[in-house]
Image: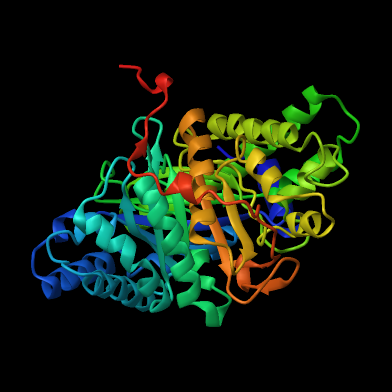
């Protein structure tokens, strides 16, 4: 039971510390929609998604009003479309038709995003998966709500370097296809290693094939709450610091559990997981970088940053799993640049570089996220960045991801505005030495020795 003290404390966290439920995401299986007729497939997909989600937005708003808890986004994730469209889609244009169907149903039900324009190719690509991947630039330039992700590696299978090389080209083509919007299409495209099946956060959400027909996953975010809690333990020992973060994460997760179960009951869809991720926003006071600086860094990126982030991430997870038996998704601290005012400040001060961000991804929740790079960055360099990040995920048995935005027409130091929760970012420098010969090798990087645990 939640007592009155917890209610009052939750109210304070909402009113003063930017606590919110970042998203209610309904995952929907489209496997029973599959057929070899494209028009029928589009109808099946639209009807299945609309039937489950027509009340999703209204239900989220109703829960927010009744409990006084902000629910920022309502979203949908679906079975990776490369699997769903394999029989009916014979060209990239056919897959784009499915993207437009997803976009239409998302608009009609009123959600913020729909994820699952995805392919899982960690060991190899089917013809349909390659077609979908090659269609991504066109699909993202012709839709508003669709998000795309591609999983190119895993600890069990290694890294599919053919897919990595292709994704370097696709990211650059997506930037070019959306150059009139500061290459915004790349903000809706994520390249993963060890992608989870139950992630409610965009742009990487998709509905895994091991999931139920439909599921409710909730993502909670509270960097501002953690920051407020740490302000009261300045100068205290690591033990006090860790206990404070754990207790705060426990309280935040309880809010997410309440919303998830209520949404599940009202929509008649099973509850899946709560994703406890400290996902920042451009709002002042809602920053993971600010938390790291409260822990004791002059600026995020200073020596000690990776250790401080490792501590934060671990304590968030420990507090979360005590609050709910079903913590999943990504759950930890996100370190996007454009969505975090403290990160932006650190980049502008010269404290935070792309190389330091890569080191931080070894211990954070995901990876290199929402990073603007020069528009003339080559596909090979982008592929090299993806390969490095996938290697970190593969060897460390964790989810890693790359969401970089080569902003066409912009160079180092210039600012780019994405708007809304996506924020704004300074264009960061990229190592200018070439990795072309490396990423041009064919095949895959084998799985590490510690992956063989059967």
Please identify the residue farthest to the front as the structure is shown: 437
Q: Quarter holding the C terminus? A: top left
Q: Residue 84: name its quadrant.
A: bottom left
Q: Position of residue 315 (x, y in %)?
A: 66, 31
Colour mapping: rainbow
Quick one: 390 or 38, which is closer to the camera? 390
Residue at point 54%, 73% (across, down): 183
Compare residues 169 and 137 and report the one nearer the observer: 169
User: In this view of the protein, can residue 61 be seen by the observer?
Assistant: no
| Quarter of the image where one finds residue 69 | bottom right
Q: Position of residue 63 (x, y in %)?
A: 50, 61
Identify which residue is drawn at 13% across, 66% down: 88
Is 52 situated above or below 235?
below
> Eyeballing the image, is 309 above or below 23?
above
Residue 157 visible somewhere in the drawing = yes
Residue 417: image location, x then y, percent: 66, 74
For the N terminus, the image quarter is: top right
State the residue lying farthest toward the left. Answer: 36
The residue lying furthest to the top in this view is 454
Q: Quadrant of residue 156?
A: top left
Q: Residue at x 55, y 44 (%)?
A: 366
Number of numbered labels in the structure image: 0
Where residue 391 sits: x, y (%)?
49, 36
Describe residue 399's horizontal placement relative to residue 50 as left or right. Answer: right
Q: Nearer the viewer, residue 226 or 34?
A: 34
């Amino acid at each position: 039971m939640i007592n009155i003290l917890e209610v009052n404390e939750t109210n304070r966290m909402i009113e003063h510390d930017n606590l919110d439920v970042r998203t209610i995401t309904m995952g929907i299986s489209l496997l029973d929609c599959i057929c070899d007729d494209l028009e029928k497939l589009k109808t099946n997909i639209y009807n299945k998604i609309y039937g489950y989600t027509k009340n999703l937005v209204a239900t989220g708003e109703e829960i927010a009003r009744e409990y006084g808890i902000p629910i920022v986004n309502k979203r949908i994730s679906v079975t990776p479309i490369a699997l769903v469209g394999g029989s009916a889609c014979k060209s990239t244009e056919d897959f784009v038709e499915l993207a437009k169907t997803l976009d239409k149903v998302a608009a009609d039900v009123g959600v913020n995003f729909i994820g699952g324009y995805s392919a899982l190719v960690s060991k190899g690509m089917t013809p349909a998966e390659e077609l979908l991947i090659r269609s991504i630039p066109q699909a993202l330039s012709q839709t508003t709500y669709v998000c795309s992700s591609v999983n190119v590696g895993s600890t069990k299978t290694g890294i599919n370097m053919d897919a990595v090389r292709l994704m370097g080209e696709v990211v650059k083509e997506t930037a070019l296809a959306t150059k009139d919007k500061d290459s915004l299409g790349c903000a809706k495209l994520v390249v993963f290693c060890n992608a989870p099946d139950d992630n409610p956060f965009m742009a990487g959400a998709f509905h895994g094939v091991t999931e139920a027909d439909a599921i409710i996953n909730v993502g909670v975010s509270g960097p501002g709450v953690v920051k407020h809690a740490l302000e009261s333990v300045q100068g205290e020992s690591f033990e006090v610091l860790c206990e404070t973060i754990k207790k705060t994460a426990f309280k935040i997760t309880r809010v997410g559990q309440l919303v998830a179960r209520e949404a599940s009951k009202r929509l008649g869809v099973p509850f899946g997981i709560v994703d406890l991720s400290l996902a920042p926003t451009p709002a002042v006071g809602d920053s993971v970088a600010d938390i790291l600086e409260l822990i004791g860094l002059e600026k995020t990126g200073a020596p000690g940053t990776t250790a401080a982030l490792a501590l934060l991430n671990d304590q968030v997870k420990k507090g979360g799993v005590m609050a709910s038996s079903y913590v999943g998704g990504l759950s930890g601290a996100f370190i996007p640049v454009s969505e975090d005012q403290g990160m932006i400040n650190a980049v502008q001060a010269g404290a935070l570089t792309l190389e330091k961000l890569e080191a931080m991804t070894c211990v954070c929740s995901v990876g290199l996220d929402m990073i603007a790079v020069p528009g003339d960055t080559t596909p090979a360099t982008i592929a090299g960045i993806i390969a490095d990040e996938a290697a970190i995920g593969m060897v460390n048995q964790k989810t890693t991801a790359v969401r970089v935005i080569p902003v066409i027409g912009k160079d180092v130091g210039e600012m780019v505005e994405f708007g809304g929760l996506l924020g704004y970012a300074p264009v960061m420098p990229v190592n200018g030495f070439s990795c072309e010969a490396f990423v041009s090798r064919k095949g895959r990087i084998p799985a590490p020795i510690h992956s063989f645990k059967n």
